[in-house]
Amino acid sequence: MDFVIGIDVGGTKILVGACDMNFNLLVSKKVPTNAHSDTKEQITQRMIACIRDVIDETEKTYSGYTLSAIGIGAPGPVDSAKGVVIDAGNLGNWHHVPIVSILSGEFGVPSFLEKDGNTAALGEFTLGAGRGTRNLAVVTVGTGLGCGLILNGQIYSGRFGFAGEFGHIVISEQKIPCVCGGYGCLEMFTCGRAMVRMMKEAIAAGKSSCLSGDFTAVDIQHAAESGDELALAVIREAGDYLGRGLVSLINLLGPDKVLIGGGVSNLGNVLLDTTKSVVHDRAYTFYRDTPIERTTLGTNSGLFGAAVLAKRSLESAEVCNG
Ligand SMILES: [Zn+2]
């Protein structure tokens, strides 16, 4: 029996899992990323040690199982064709890493890289709420705003290998600078960080709220639940922006379904309900009933998606070579 390794690289932790070819999770482990305190080499070596642990435990527990491929999802931009993580801001020192050749050399099996939004989308498409679709958009609302696109059953990578930067469509003339080099991007008005900024600006402008000083998107949600009108208004505003962004995405691509995941999307229903009503009111008439649902694989969508990437890429490589 063969198994594959799926890896989900995040700003705080690296998740590594072994899956059989039906994507049952056999063994999983995680290590801290320490992206800003450790060197590039230290981070890579810690990841390799974790992968080795997972492989050893899998082979020990499931006799006769052999590693066949490794899939890895990392924050973009990544060059998926060359297998290089380029320069994801929240991965600190871990940039310009030729991770595919490193892993293939270390473990002697083919390895494949995609940006994390795409692996999450592939996970949901194959094993989660996106099953049965051909065209799927998976939007992750967390600290930032991520997205992965499956078009005609395949990851859509675009010119540089990390297309689907939904968070960077231009939605406002406000000159709030964005990590992408532009300004007025959707991410600046929708993600957890954006909600905190909007809340602080409103408080500074004299609006009253039970929140003050430093707080997080979770605190804003709690304030809204306890009846704080300003917190509720900020969540609705973020949901309204997300809805307007989705109207453009849905009109442009006509996906069978849109899935919303990530930490902020789990904060109650106000954000998602607002988003859905904007799509219902403003999308092209034919698309207004596009299902907008929550992801179902939770924090494991990236891990499973990376495992699916490994298996699918291996199979298509075999077809090409065969
Ligand atoms: Zn941007």
Image: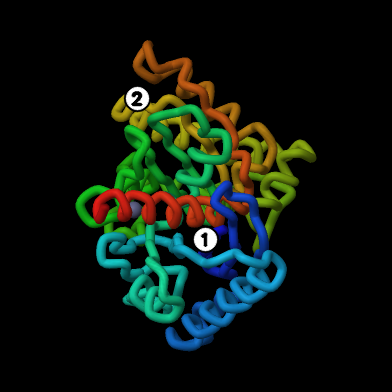
Residue at image coords 20%, 52%: 159
Any part of residue 199 in sight: no
Under tag 2, what secondary structure?
A: loop
Pointers 1 and 2 in contact (C-beta within 8 Å): no
Which residue is the site of mark 2? 254
Q: Earlier in the sequence, mark 1 or mark 2?
A: 1
Q: Left of 51 or right of it: where is 85?
A: left
- Considering every residue shown, the one lying at the far left of the view is 159
Q: Which mark is residue 4?
A: 1
Q: Is residue 203 above or below residue 93?
A: above
Residue depicted at x 39% and y 66%: 111
Percent of width and height locating residue 214: 65, 63
* Residue placed most toward the observer, 285 or 69: 69
- Point out the residue furthest to the top here: 285
- How much space separates mark 1 and mark 2, taking CA atoms? 33 Å
Question: Given the current orientation, which residue lies at the most extreme right position?
Answer: 226
Mark 1 surroundings: few (<14), some (14-19) or many (≥20) residues within 10 A:
many
Residue that appears at 56% across and 43% down:
261
Amino acid type of disc 1? Val
Q: Would you identify the image quadrant in which residue 171 lies? A: top left
- Position of the N terminus by quadrant: bottom right
